[in-house]
Each structure stands twice: as structure tokens, then as C-alpha cells.
Amino acid sequence: MENPTGATPTITVRLFGAFEVRRNGLALTAADMGGVKPRHILEILLLNLGTPVSKTRLIEILWGPGASDGAVATLESYVSGIRRAIQPGQTKTGPLRTANSGYVLDPQLVDLDLANFRRLVHAAGESEPATAHRLLLEALEISAEPLLGFELASEWAEEARTHHAAVKVTAQIFAAETAALLDKPDVAVNLAQAAIRSEPLNERAWTVLVTAYEQAGLPVEGLAAYDRCRRLFDRDLGCAPGPALQEAHLRLLRQRAEGNSELSEVLAALLYLGERLNGPKGRQLPAGESRRMHENAGRVLDSFLQRVRAAV
């Protein structure tokens, strides 16, 4: 990706999928940098691109509280090896610099896929829907593979993956919302489903999914999605979906009943009786009219249930 500052990056790095470092087009391996620990140091600095990480913090992350007295010297030796690999002959002008009793990577000299993902998501938040949607899809394409998927035994890598996963879900939901605004309900459904797979209890994702089905004219699929959400929330959270989802559910019920007079009557009867059970929220009807409507709703439901029993 083009560097927005105008500076020419001297290294290109991938943290999504297979770890890869390229210097002027030449691929570098962990062995080129001195082994696994130097690679970890580089990865930690990349996760904090542009922000200094102290030697004390690096030692804490890499060796824990049991680090030996020689940990500082070992760390400095590893960093020297990294410098020789990524910026030969550029100790002071290359991307890896000494700063604040630690080290920092100059973001102007590093083309990092994770930084590009973050930049695109940030730009999307400041753009109108069409542009935001395009930027978000580009960001999600960059992050299609797991972050640091090759570092499965490191706690710091797992923390980074967890944080990124939450950011990615937010981006997926935002992309789904912009897709809906652009009248692309099929795209919105796919993006919302991806977000739900990562965070099954994310109500915003469920809301986008149900409303996208509504927008696509698929009330049966929308009602099924709402039911899955309702059951999941009841089981894991002990609560019902919020007002936005409930309103979408009601719209889907009405959409499903359109063109079917019997279903419309049954739905109207259920809504009337449900309102009476939960307490009247609108104007009070005269006693006689209220009783008549109550009896009529009961007859509609009783007739419908009899037909259901006969058909089963």
C-alpha cells in the first residue's frame, strides 16, 4: 500500500497469514534475523508500530519475571542482529531506532499489513457510505487470514489476536451496515453472518442480519434468524433481544403476513392480546368495544388453532 507520508518504506511486512519480511524485494527468514526470539522482538515492535517499547517491557514479555541478569545484553544482541538483517549499513537511518530506553519502528519506513488494515478502518469511519464500504472491504480482504497465526504458543500474540478480532468484527458490522445503506442486502447478510460467527452474542450484528433479510424481502429467513438470536440470548445472557431487534421482528411478521388474510388476522389478534397482557400503552377503548375486540381476537385464534390441529 502507498505510504500516505510520501516516504519510501524500506521493509514490507505481513503479520496476517504467513509471517514475511521483505527488504527491497528480498524475502528475509527468521534465521536471517537470528532465530525465533529476534523474530518475536520484531513482531512485538510491529504490533506497536510507531510507539516505543522499553527494554524492560520487552524483557517482561519475552522472558517473564524470571529473566536472568544478562537479559538486557541478550536483548541488545538480538536487536543488533535484526538491524543487520532489515537495515544493513543504516543503523541510525533505518526503520528500527533506539528511543526512550527501548526501541521503535518508524511507521514511515515500514509497510505493514496490520497498519494498513487499521488505516483503512479509520478512514472508513470518516467517509460517506459508498467510500466507507469500499475501504472496509479492502481492510477485510487484507485481514482475511489470522493475525500472527504462526505464533500459537505466545501469550502476547494471543492477546494481539483477541484485540484484533474485536476490531475486525466491528469492521464487518460497519461494512454490513454500509452495504444495507447502499441497497446491497445480500452483501450485508454475508458480512453480518461472518461477524456473528466470531461473536455470537453481538446484538448489533444480529440487528443488521435481521434487517438485511427484511430489506431483501426474505421474511422467513429473517424470522428464523431472530428466533436463533432470541434463543441464544435467553440461554447465555438470560435476556431478550433489545428494542431495535424486536421492532425488526414485528416488521418481519407483518411482511410475512402480507397477502394472506388469515395470517394477517391471526397476527393482529396476537398483537392485540399481547398488548392487553402487557398493559395498555395507547388510548383506552370504551369497555364495550374493548370486550368485543377481545372476543373477536379469541375467536380468530381459536379458529386458526383448530385448523392447525386438523392439519397435523
Image (cartoon, helix red, strand yellow):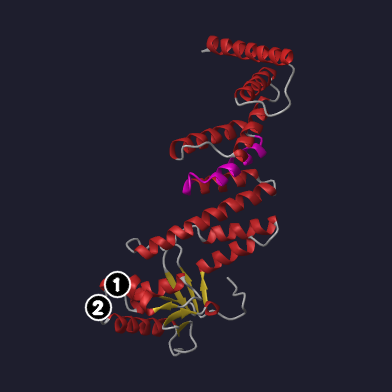
The residue tagged 1 is 63
Q: Which mark is residue 143?
A: none
User: Residue 58, located in which quarter of the rendered image?
Assistant: bottom left
Q: Earlier in the sequence, mark 1 or mark 2?
A: 1
Q: In this view, does 50 lie above or below 163?
A: below
- For image coordinates 43% across by 63% down, the residue present is 160
User: Residue 189, located in which quarter of the rendered image?
Assistant: top right
Q: Is residue 44 left or right of residue 300?
A: left
Give percent across and percent down for residue 182. Answer: 70, 49
Q: In this view, does 15 lie above or below 271?
A: below
- Say which amino acid is labelled 1: Trp
> Gap between marks 1 and 2, in whole Å?
8 Å
User: Residue 62, located in which quarter of the rendered image?
Assistant: bottom left
Q: In this view, does 31 lie to the left or right of 52?
A: left
Give percent across and percent down for residue 95. Answer: 48, 82
Q: In this view, does 244 lie to the left or right of 194?
A: right
Please state, as top left, top right, bottom left or bottom right, where the N terminus lies in the image: bottom right
- Say which amino acid is labelled 2: Ser
The residue tagged 2 is 68
> At numbered mark 1, what does the secondary structure look like: helix, strand or loop?
helix
What are the residue bounds of the magenta stretch?
A: 197-217
Residue 196 drawn in magenta: no
Give percent across and percent down for residue 57. Answer: 38, 74
Q: Are marks 1 and 2 in contact (CB under 8 Å)?
A: yes
